[in-house]
Image: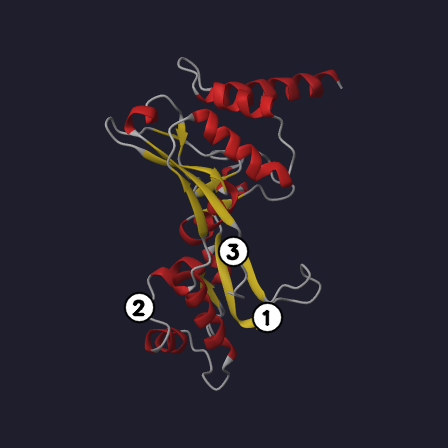
């Protein structure tokens, strides 16, 4: 919404022949801390290829949850086995007010994850919380945006709500902010080398770390991610019991 770039993405075109040799995971859309904290595995139909995300998965997952999905984490002081401890929240934009002071530095817009109930105003108040995903259904940023604000009982003499809604429409629907590089090679060693070089300026990942990642991705009889997660849970439990 402020016109800043969000970085480029590294994608890999995987042929139908190669797609059968790897395990792929879908994007996480509805995050639930207890029931669905991880991206689910997905099956590529026989004879179909895939476009794999090599770098940028966290950014794309954040966009996916904010636009299409929801976020549910455990409330403080609530038991982990209590289903009501994980309220389903979706991303909303405050159309009436800017980001509150004391929030994250340099924040201009007030985005919050809210339940649908939290986003509803009192009967006499304007509906200031706009669910971000609804911007995909808005016909245009002109007359349709004006009608949206009028339906929400927002005072049109104040230009700021319209400006915020317009910027959201522009940022999501019009601004070409996402750039990507699509690698067509089917050589896993080349793809791995590209990934290492792209990440060399960030968190240092050794070549052996990435080789292990590629190797476990091709396990046939076991799900490598689930096996590692199960091991981590077991170690945490045993450490907690020992303490």
Furthest residue in direction bottom, as rendered: 157
Helix, strand or loop at mark 1: strand
Q: 217 or 107, which is in the foreground?
A: 217
From this view, report whether residue 115 is shown above or below residue 80: below
16 lies left or right of 156: left
Residue labelled with disc 3: 114
Residue 233 screen position, x and y as percent:
59, 22
What crowding class fits label 1: few (fewer than 14 Cα within 10 Å), some (14-19), or many (20 or more)? Answer: some
Residue shown at the point (50%, 38%) measured from the top left:
83
Q: How many marks?
A: 3
Q: CA distance from mark 1 to mark 2?
A: 25 Å
Determine which residue is flagged by label 2. 139
Proximity of marks 1 and 3: CB atoms separated by less than 8 Å: no
Please say whether residue 81 is visible from this viewpoint: no
Q: Position of residue 100 (x, y in %)?
A: 65, 67
Which quadrant would the C terminus be assigned to in this image? top right
Q: Which mark is residue 216?
A: none
Frontmost residue, 27 versus 151: 27
Residue 10 screen position, x and y as percent = 47, 41
Q: Nearer the viewer, mark 1 or mark 3?
A: 1
Name the one closer to the observer, 227 or 206.
Answer: 206
Q: CA distance from mark 3 to mark 2?
A: 24 Å
- Residue at x-position 36% and y-position 21%: 21
Marks 1 and 3, Cα distance to the nearest angstrom?
Answer: 17 Å
Residue 211 visible in the picture = yes
Whichever of callouts 3 and 2 sits on the residue coming sooner in the sequence is 3
Q: Earlier in the sequence, mark 1 or mark 2?
A: 1
Characterize the local packing of mark 2: few (<14), some (14-19) or many (20 or more) Cα atoms within 10 angstroms.
few
Task: Judge by depth and name the residue closer to the eye, 74 or 232.
Answer: 232
Label 1: which residue? Answer: 98
């Amino acid at each position: 919404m402020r016109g800043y770039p969000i970085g480029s993405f590294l994608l890999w075109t995987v042929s139908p022949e190669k797609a059968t040799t790897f395990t792929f995971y879908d994007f996480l859309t509805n995050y639930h801390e207890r029931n669905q904290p991880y991206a689910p595995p997905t099956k590529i139909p026989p004879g179909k290829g895939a476009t794999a995300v090599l770098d940028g998965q966290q950014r794309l997952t954040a966009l996916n949850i904010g636009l299409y999905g929801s976020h549910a984490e455990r409330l403080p002081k609530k038991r982990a086995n209590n289903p009501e401890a994980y309220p389903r929240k979706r991303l909303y934009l405050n159309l009436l007010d800017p980001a509150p002071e004391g929030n994250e530095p340099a924040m201009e817009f007030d985005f919050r994850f809210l339940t649908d109930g939290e986003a509803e105003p009192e009967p006499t108040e304007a509906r200031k919380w706009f669910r971000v995903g609804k911007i995909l259904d808005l016909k245009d940023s002109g007359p349709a945006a004006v009608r949206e604000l009028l339906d929400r009982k927002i005072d049109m003499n104040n230009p700021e709500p319209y400006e915020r809604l317009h910027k959201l429409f522009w940022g999501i629907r019009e601004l070409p902010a996402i750039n990507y590089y699509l690698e067509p090679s089917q050589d896993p060693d080349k793809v791995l080398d590209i990934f290492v070089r792209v990440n060399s300026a960030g968190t240092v990942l050794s070549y052996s770390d990435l080789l292990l990642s590629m190797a476990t991705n091709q396990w046939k009889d076991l799900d490598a991610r689930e096996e590692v997660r199960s091991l981590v849970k077991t170690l945490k439990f045993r450490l907690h019991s020992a303490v």
